Amino acid sequence: MSTLEVSNLNDGTTTVATTFVTNGSAKGYCLFNQSTPAINKSLNTSSLTDTSAGKGQINWTNAMSGGETAYSCVTSTLNVHASDAYVASLTSDRSNVTITASSWSFVSAYANASTAALFDPLHAMATAHGDLA
Amino acid sequence: MTHGHLWDRLAEAKTRLDPVQSKYRVLFEDPSTPDEPAKVLVPDPNFMAAALEGDILPPIETYQRDRGVPDGQPKEHPYAEPIGAMTEEEAIEYLIMKDIPPNVWRDYEGNRCIMRIVPVELIPSDRNFRNAWRINQETEMAA
């Protein structure tokens, strides 16, 4: 394997340090189905803990530097019919669980005009950005 | 140090190893939260591939020592020398010690069975009563 040593990148007008790119790249992700439950695609994930309906935890193989790591999340919507539209959200369960450097606890919920509840997403993805331990 | 950083080894392994879906799941109840339902630990396919391949994952003892290291402080496991190949069963035991709290697999002294390694087929597919799941105490293997 050959190694390319580059300190800066230039697109013709702007120069950025290569650390600008490496620091901003995802350090882990997990695409999962909580209904099965199963992990479909991942990087730096060791396991998924199915905690209860709509709740769980992603465990990282290489820990992050701390619990303040930034996460971006996507989950599937249940229903997009105009007459009965839902919104669904996968988000950090910080209000109930302490987020650590080695795992991320999540909660998945949906809501419409009249109801809201936790649910098990068929397709959900969380991506971790930040520094590694 | 010639073995590099753990994350680099994981990223490299992902490019050449096929994911391995484990045939096992780990059911456990946390005695510190007795009102919560049984939890299910699902092994990651890329993690399993790395464990079966060897020379990628650090010794489990490094994770256990890192439990006592405050967040933000340097951790041992990313820089530790990797260990050799594991069997699938050894990889599951490794995951238990890494991702399940010690008060479940090491410190619990009660009579109730609070952890079981089960074939994936024994995890119920009907999740209507997910929040009522408990580990069956009457049979050897059933969830």
Image (cartoon, coloured by chain):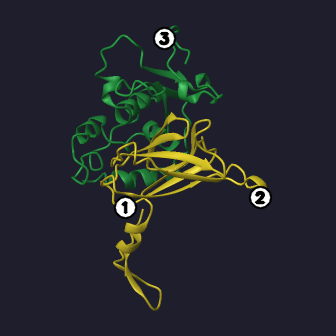
Chain colours: A yellow, B green
Q: Residues within 10 Å of mark 3 (few under 14, many from 20)?
A: few
Name the amino acid, label 3: Gln
Element carrying mark 1: loop
> Mark 1 or mark 2: which is in front?
2
Left or right of residue B47, residue A36 in this image: right
Chain at tag 3? B
Residue of label 2: A82
Q: Are marks 1 and 3 on the same chain?
A: no
**Which residue occupies 28% across, 53% down?**
B2
Q: Chain of mark 1?
A: A
Which residue corresponds to the image point at 62% horizontal and 37% vertical from the top-left? Answer: A35
Residue B47, how many percent across, how many down? 46, 42
Labels 2 and 3 within one chain = no
Residue type for callout 2: Ala
Report whether mark 1 lies on the same chain as mark 2. yes
User: From this viewpoint, which residue is outermost toward the bottom?
Assistant: A13
Residue occupied by mark 3: B137
In the depicted view, which residue is nearer to us: B8 or B34?
A: B34
Query: At numbered mark 3, what does the secondary structure look like: helix, strand or loop?
Result: loop
Residue identifier under label 1: A130
Residue B21 point in image, percent of width and height: 56, 36
Q: Please give the chain letter of the residue carrying mark 2.
A: A
